[in-house]
């Protein structure tokens, strides 16, 4: 009897091991069956092959290794050019900012794969230290320096903060797009406030030779929507699911590969998280409120 039980348990153990091996093999086989032979990869805010290779070269090769699929760069001329490229299947994967994601989703039905959450990514509103402005509502009738049209942290999110404070973006304040020179305009009194990103603030002051004590942050907004990797909707859904799983599993390696580029230090301390379309509704709301809903 004991020998019979021993034989039975041995068979169960062997079957279990075989099932585990088969499961792993089946996953790899399924990936191989559904995966394209190669993928084209674009980044919405990087123009030119040279810059793509400089900033994302190691990331590309790391992702290629993780997915076991050859990946080639596809340079785009501007942030919105990735949408028609996705539609025409010239590109398969795009790394986009929150604002660009909405364009890719609405115009090309791009599918979010995974988002990269930055630990210190907020919009802040800054005034001079001697300013009497202490609240966002006091910016009614004032001029505010922002970064550039469509910037999540330097235009859309600050506009949402002002909307939440009861101000109408069409009539209650004036916006001037000055990129990172907004701080100099604020110092000279040419504007009343300056909107920027929390993770850029100190670096901008340092690069401009300015001191924090001369400015006051009157408001810090909530954590902003994440940058996101999206896929063409023409890729097999099973491949996208497997790609998402592999990227999460190997996220430390992927993020470390981004940090080798000086221009991508904003991702230090970041993590990969599931990308939910609803996380970007805040940006949709701003576009609607400023009368640019058709843009999406």
Image (cartoon, rainbow, N blue to C red):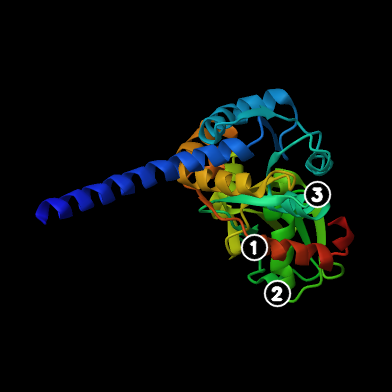
Q: Quadrant of residue 243?
A: top right
Of 7 and 170, nearer the camera is 7
Q: Residues within 10 Å of mark 2 (few under 14, many from 20)?
A: some
Q: CA gap, disc 1 to disc 3?
A: 18 Å
Q: Position of residue 247 (x, y in %)?
A: 52, 43
The residue at which mark 1 appears reads as 279
Q: In the image, which disc is placed on residue 108? A: 3
Q: Position of residue 121 (x, y in %)?
A: 57, 54
The quarter of the picture where the N terminus appears is bottom left
The residue at which mark 2 appears reads as 165
Q: Position of residue 236 (x, y in %)?
A: 68, 45
Of 120 and 80, nearer the camera is 80
The quarter of the picture where the C terminus appears is bottom right
Label 2 sits on a secondary structure element that is loop
Hey, which residue is sitting farthest bottom in the picture? 166
Q: CA gap, disc 2 to disc 1?
A: 21 Å
Q: Nearer the viewer, mark 3 or mark 2?
A: 3
């Amino acid at each position: 009897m004991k020998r019979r039980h021993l034989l039975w348990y041995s068979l169960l153990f062997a079957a279990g091991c075989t099932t585990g091996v088969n499961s792993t093999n089946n996953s790899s086989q399924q990936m191989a069956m559904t995966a394209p032979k190669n993928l084209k990869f674009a980044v919405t805010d990087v123009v030119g092959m040279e810059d793509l290779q400089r900033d994302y070269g190691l990331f590309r090769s790391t992702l290629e290794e993780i997915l076991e699929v050859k990946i080639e760069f596809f340079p785009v001329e501007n942030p919105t050019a990735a949408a028609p490229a996705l539609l025409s299947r010239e590109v398969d994967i795009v790394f986009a900012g929150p604002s660009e994601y909405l364009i890719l989703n609405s115009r090309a039905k791009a599918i979010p794969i995974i988002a990269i959450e930055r630990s210190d990514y907020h919009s802040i509103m800054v005034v001079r230290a001697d300013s009497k402005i202490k609240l966002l509502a006091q910016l009614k009738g004032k001029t505010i320096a922002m970064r550039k049209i469509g910037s999540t942290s330097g235009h859309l999110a600050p506009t949402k903060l002002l909307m939440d404070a009861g101000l109408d973006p069409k009539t209650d304040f004036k916006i001037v797009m000055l990129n990172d020179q907004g701080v100099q305009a604020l110092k000279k009194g040419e504007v009343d406030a300056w909107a920027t990103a929390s993770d850029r603030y100190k670096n901008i002051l340092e690069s401009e030779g300015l001191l924090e004590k001369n400015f006051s942050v009157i408001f810090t907004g909530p954590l902003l929507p994440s940058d996101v990797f999206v896929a063409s909707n023409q890729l097999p859904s099973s491949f996208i699911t497997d790609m998402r799983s592999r990227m999460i599993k190997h996220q430390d390696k992927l993020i470390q590969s981004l940090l080798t580029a000086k221009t991508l230090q904003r991702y230090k301390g970041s993590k990969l998280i599931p990308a939910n379309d609803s996380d970007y509704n805040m940006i949709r709301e701003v576009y609607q409120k400023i009368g640019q809903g058709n843009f999406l």
